Image: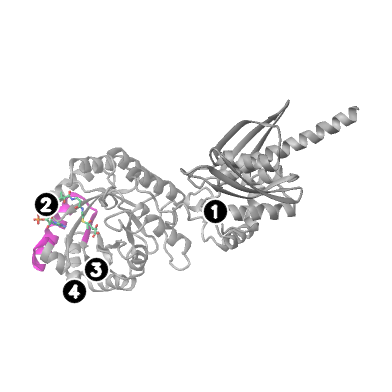
Amino acid sequence: MTASTDRIVIFDTTLRDGEQCPGATMTFEEKLDVAHLLDRMGVDVIEAGFPIASNGDFEAVAEIARRTETAIVAGLARAIPADIARCGEAVRFARRPRIHTFVSTSPIHLAHQMRKTEEQVLEIISGTVAQARNLVDDVEWSGMDATRTPIDYLCRAVEAAIRAGATTINLPDTVGYATPDEYRNMFVQVRERVPGADKVIFSTHCHDDLGLAAANSLAGVAGGARQIECTINGIGERAGNAALEEIVMALKVRRDAMPYETGVDSTLLTRASRLVSAATSFPVQYNKAIVGKNAFAHESGIHQDGMLKHSETYEIMTPASVGMSKTSLVMGKHSGRAAFKDKLKALGYELGENALQDAFARFKDLADRKKHVYDEDIEALVDNQIASGNDRIKVLSLTVIAGTMGPQSATLTLDIDGVHTTVQAVGNGPVDAIFNAIQRVVPHEAQLALYQVHAVTEGTDAQAEVSVRLEEGDKMVTGRGADPDTLVASARAYVAALNKLATKRVSLNAQAAIRA
Ligand SMILES: CC(=O)SCCNC(=O)CCNC(=O)[C@H](O)C(C)(C)COP(=O)(O)OP(=O)(O)OC[C@H]1O[C@@H](n2cnc3c(N)ncnc32)[C@H](O)[C@@H]1OP(=O)(O)O
Ligand SMILES: CC(C)C(=O)C(=O)O
């Protein structure tokens, strides 16, 4: 494969390095689904697995090789003849097969992992790369732990691989140790010093142990690499690999600073992220760049206000460009009036200025007490306010003592036509105590016909919506109250029913007076 100077080859290793992280194992079918989407997305190389690892891995690589239409299908192999032969057997079904063989180059790996001398490893490189080249035309060689390898030896190893026929040279930051400057320099030096370096494509493969995987990959490109190895959602060994979605979008959004392009259709990134998350059962962190739930969500008032005025104030790319449905303005304690007004409009409410201020104050109060304020919470809050606009009786405060040591008692202050009255009452349970307190301040004959509680939304901090039905003679009314505190919602619902009853009584008396 050749690459033009501004085209970056995207090599996806979700199915190989991605699957290596504990717990990320995917089934045969899941691997086929992921590979299919990667191919559709325009990923250039799919590393489908490590065929010698197991029969399952071999079958998956072989089947992906058979089915993939456009991408190159690669399999991984150690620098061992049996590995390379098995890998060749699996990828031979591909339209465009690649064998990716690797061996350690750093002193610590040579001494402890391989237990071989530098010279022995050079010989192994020559032999195994040549073996792979006899099986396929496209051979990638990786120097495992390249970033902890002295540059002179690394150059000798790369030279041996190129001489033996490698077409892509990958210099991995296997343990996520390099800094961007070091990583870029390594590519510059190897490309300058190794004969034949201009005939091959250099590749990055970065791990995220220090959170530098994406930055290092792009630094590698600045040093002359034209292939980036990465995974969907950044999954991979230990802290993971460079995330494909971050690389693709960094190159797309900052083309002005990095004049390179990829062939990936970025509108499929969110879909790929969700597919891999479902297949591996690894949730995507909320604040994950590009594909996280919060990547296009704004809660703070200043940002929401800016977003409503012009989306580029706080977003450097559109949600559509990564396949997300839309920006979300999340209502919470940091939201301001602009977003609240916009939300009310979206929910179909048009409030006057005073009612709006009132609703906003109640919303802030609710948001202070509740972690997530959902649309349903806002609807309940505004409906409550509209319903209680002309109420004669209002709940001002409520304190309840409840628990195993009865009797439960309620101290309640009501505002009745502007007069504040406080009473205390006990009851058989906190709700009974509240209703008794209301009965003492507002004596009435109405009977409680229904008391019902349901949660407006999910979670232990959900708003409770309470319905209270009162019957007085042939009159029947239902009052509703909503609050994260079920007892406050109960008091509000009872008082709302009394207000409705009072309104009914007045209108019935008026009708009777008219008839008389
Ligand atoms: C940085 C990376 O991501 S490398 C890829 C890592 N991925 C995996 O290891 C996943 C798949 N691995 C496996 O299924 C198994 O480890 C296998 C099938 C590859 C090997 O299994 P085993 O033969 O039981 O060996 P084991 O895993 O215990 O040890 C690894 C052996 O490979 C050798 N080895 C490691 N890397 C290489 C290499 N690139 N080339 C040659 N030999 C290597 C080790 O030195 C060790 O050899 P030793 O047993 O002679 O000391
Ligand atoms: C096999 C190589 C490319 C690897 O995964 C690494 O060095 O991290």
- Residue where numbered disc 4 is placed: 152
- Residue where numbered disc 1 is placed: 369
Of tags 1 and 2, the one toward the viewer is 1
> Circle 4 — which element?
helix
Question: Could you tell me residue 228's position as x and y percent?
Answer: 33, 59
Q: Which of marks 2 and 4 is nearer the N terminus?
A: 2
Magenta span: 113-142
Q: Characterize the local packing of mark 3: few (<14), some (14-19) or many (20 or more) Cα atoms within 10 angstroms.
A: many
Disc 2 vs disc 4: Cβ atoms closer than 8 Å?
no
- Residue where numbered disc 3 is placed: 147
Look at label 4 and name its amino acid. Asp
- Count the numbered circles shown: 4
Q: Does the residue labelled 2 lie within 8 Å of ligand 1?
A: no
* Residue 163 sits above or below residue 489 on the image: below
Question: Could you tell me residue 148's position as x and y percent?
Answer: 21, 69
Distance from the alpha carbon under mark 1 to that under mark 2: 65 Å
Q: Quadrant of the C terminus?
A: top right
From this viewpoint, is residue 54 visible?
yes
Ligand 1: quadrant of the figure:
bottom left
Was residue 131 drawn as part of the magenta stretch in this picture?
A: yes
Q: Earlier in the sequence, mark 4 or mark 3?
A: 3
Near-viewer residue (69 or 450): 450
- Residue where numbered disc 2 is placed: 81
